[in-house]
Image (spheres, rainbow, N blue to C red):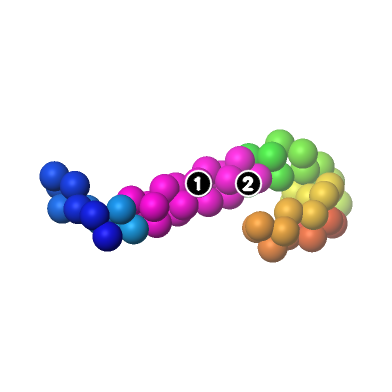
């Protein structure tokens, strides 16, 4: 473990980078899901047109 000037260890930096990457991937999938959905006029709700496993949303979920 190495420490830099701000007191962070290399393990802390690696974890932060991994978390940041995961958050960015989830944000991208969330935006894609909302842009690809279709509106069910009878139920007045959006319906997903694909599976989004990271978000635990299956195709057809409202």
Residue 30's disc number: 2
Instruction: Name the spot of residue 59 as percent of width and height, x first.
Output: 83, 56
Q: Is residue 47 visible?
A: no
Instruction: Name the spot of residue 39 as percent of width and height, x first.
Output: 80, 44
Camera-nearest label, 2 or 1: 1
Q: Which residues are magenta?
A: 13-29
- Asked if the stretch drawn in magenta spans residue 53, the answer is no
Question: What residue did someone put label 1 on?
Answer: 21
Quarter of the figure with the C terminus? bottom right
Instruction: Name the spot of residue 26 as percent of width and height, x first.
Output: 58, 49
Q: Residues within 10 Å of mark 2 (few under 14, many from 20)?
A: some
Looking at the image, which is closer to me, 30 or 9?
9
Looking at the image, which is closer to me, 39 or 26?
26
Q: Secondary structure at mark 2?
A: helix
Question: In the figure, 5 relative to 15: above or below?
Answer: above
Q: Residue at x 30, y 53 (%)?
A: 10
């Amino acid at each position: 473990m190495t420490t830099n000037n701000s007191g962070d260890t290399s393990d802390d930096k690696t974890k932060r980078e991994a978390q940041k990457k995961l958050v960015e991937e989830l944000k991208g999938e969330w935006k894609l899901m909302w842009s690809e959905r279709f509106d069910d006029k009878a139920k007045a709700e959006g319906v997903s047109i694909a599976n989004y496993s990271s978000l635990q949303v299956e195709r057809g979920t409202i």
